[in-house]
Structures are given as C-alpha cells and as structure tokens.
C-alpha cells in the first residue's frame, strides 16, 4: 500500500466556533510491519527521495493548520513523525537523517530510557547535529534506569532532557491518566519548541539589517542596498542553499548554487581533513627546503 493519504480531523467547539483540535495525515504506508525500504521493495512501492520531500513540503505549505505561530502565541503547529530511528533507511534506502535534511526541520529527539539507551540517544543526537539539524529537546520514557542523569551530564546546557512516565502496556487503557501525569512535560516541551522557533525567526529576520554592518560587498554602496534585497542563506544542503523567505509567512526554500561556491561544491568533511593535512605537509616541506638552501 503506497501513498495512503489517510486524513483525520477532530473538531471541538471553542467560544461558539468550530475549531480543529487535531489534524492527522498519513502520506505513505505499507502493509508489512518492516523498515520502509524493505517494505517498499517487497511491495513494489518505492517512493523516491525528491517525491517524498516535495510532498511533505507541499502539505506543510498548504497548511494542515492555517494559523501558525503569530506574535508569540501558539495557535497550532505541525509535527512530522518519521518512521524508525534517526539513521533508519527511508523508502528509497536513504537514511532519514539525510532524507529530510533539505527541509531544515527543528527536531525533538525521542531517546531511549532502556538499557543501552544512553549510547543510542547520544549517537542519534550527534548524528543530527553533524548534519546541521537544530535539536530543541530530547524526550525519553522512564524505565527506572535514570538514563536522563548521564544524558543531562553529557549534554549540559546544550539541550533539555524530558522524562515521561512509563506508558501502560494494557491495550484497553485509554491513556487519560498517563496524559494527566505527562501534562507538565508536554507543556514545557511546547514552550521550548515555541521559544526556539521565535528565537530562530528573530535571528533570521535581523540578518538582512546586520549584513550591511558586518559584510563588505565589493563595488557596492551599502546604503543603496535595502534589507529587503539581501538574500538570507540559512544553510546549505548538497548543491542547494536553504534560503529564508518572508512573504506574509516565513519559510525556507531551496535555491541551486549556480555560482558553484566552495560552500556547496567544496570537499566534504572527510576530504577537508585530508586537504588540511596535505596543505600542512606541503607547507612544512617548503619550509624545510628553504631552510636547507645553502647561502652563496
């Protein structure tokens, strides 16, 4: 089964108006309870990376929730839940941490509170950070091993760690009591997500103005360049820049780096290390050669 398109919406009455409480949409699903790449291959329903990313981006732009974050008030927000772990393969076999990188989503990492979960959670966190993700929080389930203590010791002030009570194993449990116990954690998580979003957009909105004070543009009179003409590059992914756009609602879109700059076309992290050592070796060799040249 591919491209399920399952759509669910719950509505509640709020001050006399009908307002959406929860909108849930499943873009793709397969029959087998397997890793997406294996299920897609067995069922002949492989989904390409570009198709999947475009569909996710398109649904977010269309707005399952038309009202987002406005003037510091959280009216609603979208959560994209991926299938599997950080480095689990997607439907095409591409690791999910690479698959969604171009979208530059801020992440909430669901860690592991079980035995061995400390190492797994830290590895997942480092994998996300190395790829340029912003991880705003880590959440684990309490399994009585206090995994949050070494996690908080390692992460220190970089990212908060939240602990949820154990989830009841009884299928008939409606989880209402569990949600009541978890209310404070979810409220804190919501506040941190909102704060991180507002801080990120604040910095992006300030960049056009700051650019004129920080950068030197050759053959350009800075006073003749209005902030609206400054292109804000949030990051890069592959051969594209992630460009911040402000058109009523802020969003980040991909633009091809036609200039083929070092940022997109330069060597990757591994080759950069090799290049650094090669340059150092050549520099030292040249210095030694100069040092031993006899004086005439």
Image (cartoon, rainbow, N blue to C red):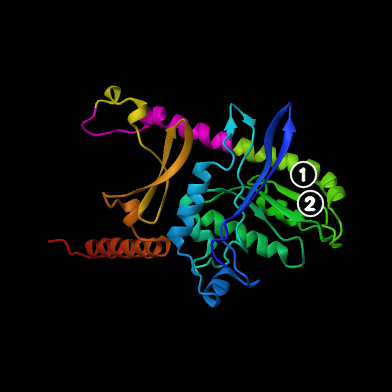
How far from the left and from the top, in percent, is residue 170? Answer: 87, 62
Compared to residue 108, the image places residue 43 above or below, namely: below
| Crowd around label 1: few <14 · some 14–19 · many ≥20 (10 Å) | some
C-alpha span from label 2 to label 1:
7 Å
**Local secondary structure at mark 1:** helix
Quarter residue 27 falls in: bottom right
Q: Nearer the viewer, residue 247 or 185?
A: 247
**Local secondary structure at mark 2:** strand
Quarter residue 207 falls in: top left
**Residue, disc 1:** 185
How far from the left and from the top, in percent, is residue 91? Answer: 52, 67
- Quadrant containing the C terminus is bottom left
How far from the left and from the top, in percent, is residue 136? Answer: 62, 45
| 219 falls in the magenta region | yes
**Residue, disc 2:** 164
Contact, mark 2 vs mark 1 (Cβ under 8 Å):
yes
């Amino acid at each position: 089964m591919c491209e399920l398109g399952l759509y669910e919406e719950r509505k509640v009455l709020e001050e006399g108006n009908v307002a959406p409480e929860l909108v849930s949409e499943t873009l793709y699903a397969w029959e087998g309870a397997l890793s997406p790449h294996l299920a897609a291959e067995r069922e002949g329903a492989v989904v390409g990376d570009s198709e999947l990313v475009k569909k996710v981006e398109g649904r977010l732009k269309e707005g399952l929730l038309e009202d987002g974050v406005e003037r510091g008030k959280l009216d609603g927000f979208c959560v994209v839940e991926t299938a599997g772990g950080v480095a689990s393969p997607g439907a095409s076999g591409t690791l999910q941490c690479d698959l969604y990188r171009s979208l530059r989503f801020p992440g909430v990492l669901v860690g592991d509170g079980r035995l061995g979960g400390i190492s797994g959670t830290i590895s997942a966190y480092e994998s996300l950070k190395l790829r340029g993700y912003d991880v705003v929080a880590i959440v684990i389930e309490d399994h009585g091993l206090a995994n949050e203590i070494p996690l908080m010791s390692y992460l220190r002030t970089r990212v908060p760690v939240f602990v949820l009570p154990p989830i009841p194993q009884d299928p008939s449990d409606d989880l209402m009591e569990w949600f009541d116990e978890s209310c404070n954690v979810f409220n804190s998580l919501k506040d941190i997500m909102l704060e991180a979003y507002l801080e990120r957009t604040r910095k992006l909105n300030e960049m056009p103005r700051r650019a004129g004070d920080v950068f030197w543009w050759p053959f350009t009179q800075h006073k003749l360049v209005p902030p609206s003409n400054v292109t804000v590059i949030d990051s890069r992914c592959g051969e594209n820049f992630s460009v911040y756009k402000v058109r009523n609602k802020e969003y980040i879109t991909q633009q091809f780096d036609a200039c083929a700059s070092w940022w997109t076309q330069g060597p990757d992290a591994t080759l950069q290390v090799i290049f650094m050592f090669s340059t150092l070796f050549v520099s030292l060799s040249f210095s030694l050669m100069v040092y031993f040249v006899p004086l005439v």
